[in-house]
Amino acid sequence: MAEKQTDTKPTDGTESHDPDFPEAFLAFMRQGWRDTTLPVGPRPEVPNYAKRRAALSAAFAGETLVIPTGGEKVRANDTEYRFRAGSDFAYLTGDHDPDSVLVLRPNGSGHDAVLYMRPRSSRENDEFFRSRHGELWVGRRHTLTEKSTELGLPTADLTELDAVLADLAPGRTRVLRGFDARVDAAVRPWDGARAEGQPARDRELAIAISELKLVKDEWEIAQLQDAVDATVRGFEDVARALPGDRGVSERLLEGIFALRARHDGNDVGYGSIVGAGEHATILHWVHNHGTTRPGELLLMDMGVENRHLYTADVTRVLPVGGRFSALQRQVYDVVYASQQAGIDAIRPGVKFKDVHRTCMRVLAEGLADLGLLPVSVDEAMDEKSTVYRRWTLHGFGHMLGIDVHDCANARKEMYRDGTLGEGYVLTVEPGLYFQPEDDLVPEELRGIGIRIEDDVLVTATGAVNLSAGLPRQADEVETWLAEQREAGPRLPG
């Protein structure tokens, strides 16, 4: 019988390789520290977060809501990935620190909101210099008062949370589950119907937050535009460093874009896809260990996540040598026509599925022109067939916001089977992919993958392409690439 494994990791925030300090050193470290304050004031976007919490409160009158952000995730052994706040939590608070939990408790007319957080290290014990959470290791944290001032939210010490959770009635409490194991364990799931592995009541909370995110307010649209603008600059950086007469590694191009993302934003919004040649036919190619080749195409699907965690999601295909071949251009023009038809179809009240059908119809017609469809376009588009999808694979797009695939918990009738509304932001990204091992396409097409993706805001009268700063038409792409190369490499500044 295998011996039971026990967790021997220290619970005080230290590690097994940390030294044992003599008392003289500890006494010396505890003295002579000047108090400091952070120059914080209310953030200008605080009213936006308050409105979102009020909308959530109205949806769950009389019930306690618990929304954690989650904690750091282990990368290897005692190292963690850079923390990124939980999207729903950040959407409701604006807080980006790990381990925090938002609790909304009913007060008769609405809810009282309290943010439970880990405040700055106390100088009354050794945490500030000995603990992995201490500020000599990770930097100065906010005090409770500072955080409350900044976010317009009452705050409390995270150490008080256990007692609060223990006092909650399961039948009157909903938890955003899957983010914080301690919270999940402390609040017993209410016995009832389950949906997708979690109690239905808790699932309804996740749905409600997701559906609130469908409509972007003016501030959110500005954040998305900020992320898109940084993404445009990132694509320019890559184009300026992309030689047309020799190969370079996909990872070099990935790194150049990542530099822009970290400089102008928080990070990349998702793993950058840099697919040279036949790698462009792999939808989520993130290995990026290939090499560009003159004469082939380069597909790049990349987006900057800005400092408020809103992300762009843009794809462009460049001819590495500077010019599309006749066949490459023919396929590219089909995808462009599909995307333009989709953008032209977008307006409030239009069904999400109708935009999809519009884009797919153009792709199917293009496949017919290429002699690939085994049936007529009408037959291929029939829901009982859809054979055209062998070469398109995915839908026309998805919602975009604080997540790259935003509103993912929304009900189908509000999203995939729903209609578009003013203030929605979504991608339009049709593509054609001819796999190198596909014997049903001519050899000259094999290994060609083309996707064009833009981020589109639904307005009262139609649609606005937020990523119009990057060209889409084949001639414009060639001209733009030549201009970027002539300008030469640059560092963000």
Image (spheres, grey):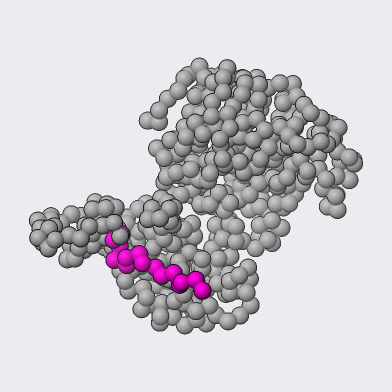
Q: In which quarter of the image is the C terminus?
A: top left
Q: Which of 301 and 456 is in front in this view?
A: 301
Picture residue at 55% right of the left edge, 57% below the top: 213
Picture residue at 23% right of the left edge, 53% below the top: 136
Q: Can residue 187 be seen in this view?
A: yes
Give the x, y percent position of residue 129: 21, 57
Residue range corresponding to the magenta coloring: 1-15
Give the x, y percent position of residue 169: 47, 82
Q: Main secondary structure of the magenta part?
A: loop
Question: Quadrant of the rendered structure where residue 265 is?
Answer: top left
Q: Can residue 128 be seen in this view?
A: no
- Up-down: is 350 above or below 183? above
Give the x, y percent position of residue 55: 50, 65
- Up-down: is 214 above or below 361? below
Picture residue at 49% right of the left edge, 71% below the top: 2
Left or right, 222 with reference to 9: right
Picture residue at 51% right of the left edge, 34% below the top: 251
- Up-down: is 184 above or below 166? above
State the count of labels.
0
Q: Nearer the viewer, residue 149 or 429?
A: 429
Q: Is residue 88 magenta?
A: no
Give the x, y percent position of residue 453: 63, 38
The residue positioned farthest toward the front in the image shown:
1
- Up-down: is 382 above or below 98? above
Left or right, 279 with reference to 17: right
Q: Does the magenta stretch include residue 5?
A: yes
